[in-house]
Image: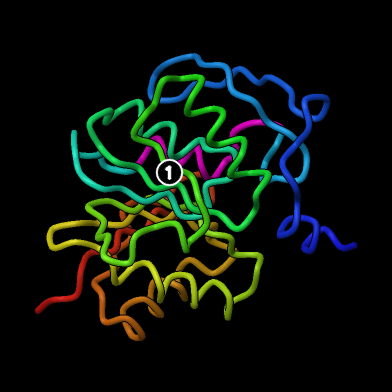
């Protein structure tokens, strides 16, 4: 089984596979559970840290989306910073979703809802999307993902995406504008990562 297959088919981690991790989220030191077979099991990866540090503060309430949630650092941060919001944490990996649910429950974040794409109500529109998108799945899968979710931004909403410069952030920015017709600007560039901000298409 390849690493790619393992990622997409991983079953929830057993008690013996889960391990505690101390991490700083939303200005707080918290303890979460991680396990192998999910993205960045050793801690907060550099791209996600740039996103959490550089994206504009989330509104206090609304419907948010963490696209590709992994064990949950983005969704947990949104839940901690905006406890009045509903935060959908979406992933294809059942192990990641189980960890995200466990971590949200341990932190008392009742607004965080982790699930696969089909669990999100079709009518849901998002005031905020934060994502460290899975660039390495390939352009076709990535484009399908963004084509599915970015147009579901609510009026006045925004998406913040962190993309490594040498993995195609500039071409992705052009693709979003050309293919989706959505304004996409470079918010900042830090440590080889760019944070792109996408806003709804003009009416």
Residue lying farthest to the top in this orientation: 29
Question: Which corner quadrant holds the C terminus?
Answer: bottom left
Q: Quadrant of the N terminus?
A: bottom right
Judged from this view, the residue extending furthest toward the left is 203
Of all residues shown, which one is farthest toward the right? 1
Q: Nearer the viewer, residue 14 or 62?
A: 14
What is the secondary structure assignment of the residue under circle 1? helix
Q: Residue at x 42, y 49 (%)?
A: 66
Classed neighbour count for the residue bearing mark 1: other residues with Cα under 10 Å, few (<14), some (14–19), many (≥20): many
Residue highlighted by disc 1 = 51
Q: Is residue 94 left or right of residue 132?
A: right
Residue numbers of the magenta segment: 42-54
Residue 85 higher or lower than 6, as above or below: above
Q: Quadrant of residue 19?
A: top right
Residue 45 colored magenta?
yes
Q: Residue at x 13, y 76 (%)?
A: 202
Residue 28 within the magenta-colored segment of the rendering: no
Determine which quarter of the picture holds residue 161.
bottom left
User: Farthest residue in the bottom direction?
Assistant: 179
């Amino acid at each position: 089984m390849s690493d790619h297959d393992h990622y997409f088919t991983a079953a929830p981690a057993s008690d013996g596979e889960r391990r505690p991790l101390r991490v700083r989220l939303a200005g707080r030191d918290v303890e979460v559970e991680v396990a192998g077979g999910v993205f960045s099991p050793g801690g907060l990866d550099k791209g996600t840290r740039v996103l959490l540090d550089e994206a504009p503060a989330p509104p206090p309430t609304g419907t948010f989306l963490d696209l590709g949630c992994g064990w949950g650092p983005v969704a947990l941060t949104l839940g901690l910073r905006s406890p009045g919001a509903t935060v959908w944490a979406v992933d294809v990996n059942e192990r990641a979703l189980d960890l995200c649910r466990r971590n949200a429950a341990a932190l008392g974040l009742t607004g965080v809802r982790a699930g696969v794409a089909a669990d999100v109500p079709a009518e849901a529109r998002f005031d905020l999307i934060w994502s460290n998108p899975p660039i390495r799945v390939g352009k076709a899968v990535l484009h399908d993902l963004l084509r599915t979710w970015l147009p579901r931004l609510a009026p006045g909403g925004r998406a913040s995406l962190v993309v490594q410069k040498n993995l195609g952030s500039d071409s992705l920015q052009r693709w979003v504008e050309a293919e989706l017709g959505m304004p996409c600007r470079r918010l900042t560039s830090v440590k080889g990562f760019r944070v792109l901000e996408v806003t709804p298409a003009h009416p």
